[in-house]
Amino acid sequence: EVQLVESGGGLVQPGGSLRLSCAASGFTFSSYSMNWVRQAPGKGLEWVSYISSSSSIIYYADSVKGRFTISRDNAKNSLYLQMNSLRDEDTAVYYCARDWQPVHHFDYWGQGTLVTVSS
Amino acid sequence: DIQMTQSPSTLSASVGDRVTITCRASQSISSWLAWYQQKPGKAPKVLIYKASSLESGVPSRFSGSGSGTEFTLTISSLQPDDFATYYCQQYNTYSRTFGQGTNVESK
């Protein structure tokens, strides 16, 4: 059974940093590209970042470019999102999501982890 | 970036109704479009991909159509479990974008 489990969320002050993790199981993690998607409270879905299976291709939404860094460790079956210079508007539930095929729809999602940026 | 516009934002319907949601892309995305269903406090779930392909395990009352810039999601006979928010998503580029969502509520 495919499972994606996010962790690392919490309360952080504006300007602070946080590192999210997504632990994958039930599939060959190194064969799939992965994404982070977020959802602010009561709002819609916003794609945040993409990383290819080998980490050779990485993309970011304009709203996080230069502040967030996506990475992965295929030996540990894990996906990460390093978030720096956090702003109030980064408050959201962050989901990791698997690409069915590279640059395709998301066939599996984690349960999400809440990040709250507030003083 | 490609912008996705869904309509309506809210749809009031009754069990048994035929429901149609529209999604428009700001430029052609061929058939690279997916539809997701999300219930409160839960992760989204894919219903349709490549504009009209039904995800395994999804009831056949859900269908998708369209190509280029105009797409629709249709629920042929709304069931109690279908009251939820629906999102379209383009994957024509690495930078995926979602529509703003359509909340299907009980009339």
Image (cartoon, coloured by chain):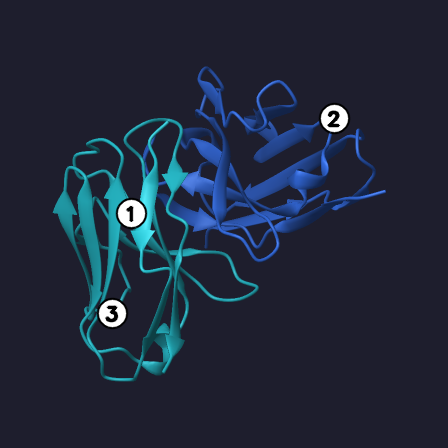
Q: Quadrant of residue A17?
A: top right
Which residue type carries mark 1?
Answer: Ala
Residue positioned most to the right: A119
Which residue type carries mark 3?
Answer: Pro
Classify mark 1: helix, strand or loop: strand
Q: Is residue B22 above or below residue B17?
A: above
Can you identify the residue that label 3 sits on?
Answer: B59
> Residue at image x 55%, y 42%?
A24
Tell me how far mark 3 sits from mark 2, CA to CA. Answer: 44 Å
Can you identify the residue that label 2 sits on?
Answer: A85
Q: Chain of mark 2?
A: A
> Residue at image x 38%, y 34%?
B96
Left or right, residue B62 beside residue A82: left
Which residue type carries mark 2?
Answer: Ser
Q: Are marks 2 and 1 on the same chain?
A: no
Q: Colour of chain B?
A: cyan
